[in-house]
Image (spheres, rainbow, N blue to C red):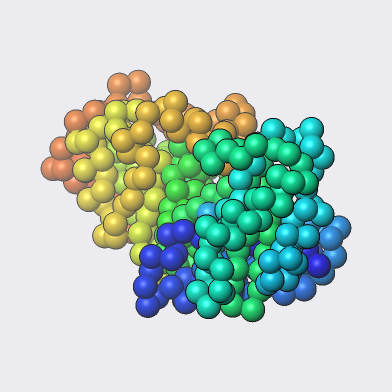
């Protein structure tokens, strides 16, 4: 019977709360592997064992594990007898052909301290059997093949090779946030980074239909689908913003419009946050990237919100963000040309050092509360799940 051993790292540091974090990880694994032939998910000491009901499910199981936060690494493992001869025979029977490697090492982790043979002695004796069977040289630093043995109370496992997980903390352990999702490169990466810290992120996209095409909404849906692979369930709010921009254009001088747009977006997102019981907002802002993202402007924009605004990308450069977007799978979607709210009614020379008194004065001409209510009431809410039902 095939098993997959899942190891976690940061969760192991949680002390008395570790059981709760592991429980959330197991729950997320069940969700990620829904619809596959999984016989059991167990939690032996310091790891999670996924027992497959059918080996045919293995490729898809391994694929889905790539997206589960909290997983440090995982490997296809075999349960073996807890005696030396049984382990040695199991290892030798699973070795690749001699030409597949030139060097090897055996690593033993003994979680069961009652097991009578110390880890170094067991590794040395098992290594001797491997050498006799294949003649490979031992290399403790850069071995071509690493054979791992894990001894637990009542169980022993062997495996050769393992895959790195994406780490972080299980989604659902860090609370709920609302993420402002544009069609660009930065905001999906920002939302993903907060998911990696255990937060569930409700996604909000502002669009300018019917003044502009529906392309940005379609991009937002596709980006939300990618992000949902990582948090399993998402809500996407599609908020019409074009008419609000038109109202602002008629009342506010050109250089302050972008600031007013952004402050109104935060207020609308905050109202949605109160509906979904979120504790903060997430944006993809980066210092100095565009006019609205100077320190002065970000400070004035933040004053419109009464809950924390998180900017996980604030100190990154564009190349770093692009590389991360490529890794998580959003980059190719983000670079598809579209027209978003930033291209509608945008002044030629926006203010880069806004002052609070000037912005307050400009907003006094607007029915801000009515605008917020209209936007939230008009939003279309879509539910996404992964894997799809």
Kindly tell me whether residue 100 is visible in this rendering. Answer: yes
Residue at 37%, 73% in the rendered image: 15
Q: Is residue 367 found left or right of 189 in the rendered image? A: left
Q: Is residue 318 found left or right of 6 in the rendered image? A: left
Q: Position of residue 202 (x, y in %)?
A: 50, 58
* Along the line of sight, the residue nearer the viewer: 82 or 218: 82
Counting labels gives: 0
Q: Is residue 15 found left or right of 141 in the rendered image? A: left
Q: Quadrant of residue 283?
A: top left
Q: Position of residue 133 (x, y in %)?
A: 78, 46
Q: Quadrant of the N terminus?
A: bottom right
Residue at 50%, 31% in the rendered image: 323
* Along the line of sight, the residue nearer the viewer: 201 or 247: 201
Residue at 49%, 48% in the rendered image: 192
In the figure, 228 relative to 18: above or below? above
* Along the line of sight, the residue nearer the viewer: 175 or 211: 175
Q: Residue furthest top?
A: 348
* Along the line of sight, the residue nearer the viewer: 202 or 193: 193
Residue at 73%, 39% in the rendered image: 135
In the figure, 182 relative to 235: above or below? above
Q: Is residue 291 found left or right of 156 in the rendered image? A: left
Kindly tell me whether residue 375 is visible in this rendering. Answer: no
Q: Residue furthest left?
A: 357
Q: Position of residue 222 (x, y in %)?
A: 64, 44
Q: Position of residue 178 (x, y in %)?
A: 43, 57
Q: Quadrant of the C terminus?
A: bottom right
In the figure, 34 relative to 230: above or below? below
């Amino acid at each position: 019977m095939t098993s997959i051993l899942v190891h976690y790292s940061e969760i192991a540091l949680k002390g008395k709360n570790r059981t709760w974090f592991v429980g959330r990880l197991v729950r997320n694994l069940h969700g990620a592997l829904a619809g596959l032939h999984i016989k059991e998910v167990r939690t032996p000491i310091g790891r999670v064992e996924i027992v497959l009901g059918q080996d045919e499910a293995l490729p898809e199981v391994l694929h889905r594990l790539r997206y589960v936060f909290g997983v440090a690494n995982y490997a296809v493992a075999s349960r073996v007898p807890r005696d030396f001869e049984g382990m040695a025979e199991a290892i030798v029977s699973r070795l690749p052909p001699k030409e597949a490697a030139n060097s090897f090492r055996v690593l033993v982790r003994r979680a069961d301290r009652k097991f009578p043979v110390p880890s170094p002695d067991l590794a040395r004796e098992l290594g001797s059997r491997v050498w006799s069977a294949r003649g490979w040289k031992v290399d403790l630093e850069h071995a071509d093949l690493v054979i791992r043995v894990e001894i637990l109370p009542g169980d022993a496992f062997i495996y050769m090779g393992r895959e790195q997980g994406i780490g972080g903390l299980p989604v659902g352990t860090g609370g709920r946030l609302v993420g402002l999702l544009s069609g660009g490169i930065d905001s999906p990466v920002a939302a993903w980074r907060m998911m990696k810290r255990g937060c569930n992120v409700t996604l909000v996209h502002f669009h300018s239909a019917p003044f502009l095409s529906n392309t940005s909404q379609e991009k937002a849906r596709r980006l939300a689908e990618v992000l949902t692979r990582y948090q399993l369930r998402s809500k996407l709010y599609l908020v019409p913003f074009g008419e609000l921009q038109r109202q602002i254009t008629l009342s506010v001088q050109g250089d302050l419009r972008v600031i007013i747009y952004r402050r109104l977006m935060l207020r609308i997102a905050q109202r949605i946050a109160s509906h979904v019981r979120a504790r903060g907002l997430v944006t993809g802002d980066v210092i100095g990237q565009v006019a609205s993202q100077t320190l002065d402007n970000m400070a004035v924009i933040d004053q419109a919100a009464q809950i924390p605004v998180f900017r996980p990308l604030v100190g990154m450069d564009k190349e770093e963000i692009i590389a991360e977007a490529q890794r998580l799978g959003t980059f190719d979607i983000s670079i598809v040309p579209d027209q978003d709210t930033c291209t509608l009614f945008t002044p030629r020379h926006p203010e880069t050092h806004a002052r609070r008194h000037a912005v307050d004065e400009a907003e006094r001409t607007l029915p801000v509360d009515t605008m917020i209510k209209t936007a939230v009431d008009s939003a279309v809410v879509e539910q996404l799940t992964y894997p799809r039902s």
